[in-house]
Image: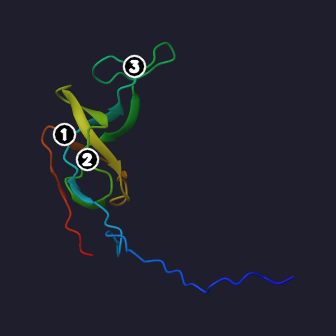
Amino acid sequence: MKKAYVKPSMESEMFLPNTYIAACEILSTWRVKCNVPAGIGYYETNGIPGYQRGSWKEEGDEEIASGKGCGIWHTGVEQEPVANAMWQERWSGRYYSVYHWTQGSSGWGHSNHHFTKVEDAEWEHEKNHS
């Protein structure tokens, strides 16, 4: 049996490059100052304004850390600073929203927990050096 003749043909595909090509991923990092006075950082978990220490009878707020801000500008903070915790001042009892983040210990006896006031925001985008 004879095969039917098929005329040779060539197919081509056109390559269209994507208009977005990233040479590197740009990370948005922040420079944030740890600026709270003596007090306690906590998560508001019991629905009562202000910090309440829990007991075996009553549910309290979740404590994060206590002390005072280190006053240092921290670089390379990767999360955008937004209110995510509360701070209650030791002497006045005043409480307010803060941004809480963790970053390496700043030395012997120092915590890796840091807090900055949201109402007196001291943060800025870092410049990208890529």
Q: Which residue is the extreme one toward the right? A: 1
Q: Which residue is mark 3?
A: 46
* Coordinates of residue 33 in the picture (x, y in percent): 20, 53
**Among the two numbered marks 1 and 2 on one chain, the one whose residue lies closer to the N terminus:** 2
Tell me if I can see residue 29 in this picture.
Answer: yes
Badge 1: residue crowd in 10 Å (few <14, some 14–19, many ≥20): some
**Among the two numbered marks 3 and 1 on one chain, the one whose residue lies closer to the N terminus:** 3
Tell me what residue is drawn at x 82 percent, y 84 percent. 2
Q: Secondary structure at mark 1?
A: loop
Count of picture labels: 3
Tell me if I can see residue 89 in this picture.
Answer: no
Amino acid type of the residue that numbered disc 1 sits on in the rendered structure: Val
Seen from the viewer's position, the closer of residues 125 and 49 is 125
Between label 3 and label 2, give the one nearer the viewer.
2
Q: Which residue is mark 2?
A: 81
- Quadrant of the drawing holding the C terminus: bottom left
**Among the two numbered marks 3 and 2 on one chain, the one whose residue lies closer to the N terminus:** 3
Q: Quadrant of residue 100?
A: top left
Dot label at residue 14: none
* Coordinates of residue 45 in the picture (x, y in percent): 40, 24
Q: Secondary structure at mark 2?
A: loop
Badge 3: residue crowd in 10 Å (few <14, some 14–19, many ≥20): some
What colour scheme has been applied to the protein in the rendered image?
rainbow
Q: Which residue is mark 1?
A: 118
Seen from the viewer's position, the closer of residues 28 and 36 is 28
Amino acid type of the residue that numbered disc 3 sits on in the rendered structure: Asn
Amino acid type of the residue that numbered disc 2 sits on in the rendered structure: Pro
**Mark pair 3, 2: CA separation:** 24 Å
**Mark pair 1, 2: CA separation:** 8 Å
Q: Secondary structure at mark 3?
A: loop
Q: Which residue is the extreme one toward the top? A: 57
Do the residues bearing badges 3 and 2 touch, measured as CB atoms within 8 Å? no
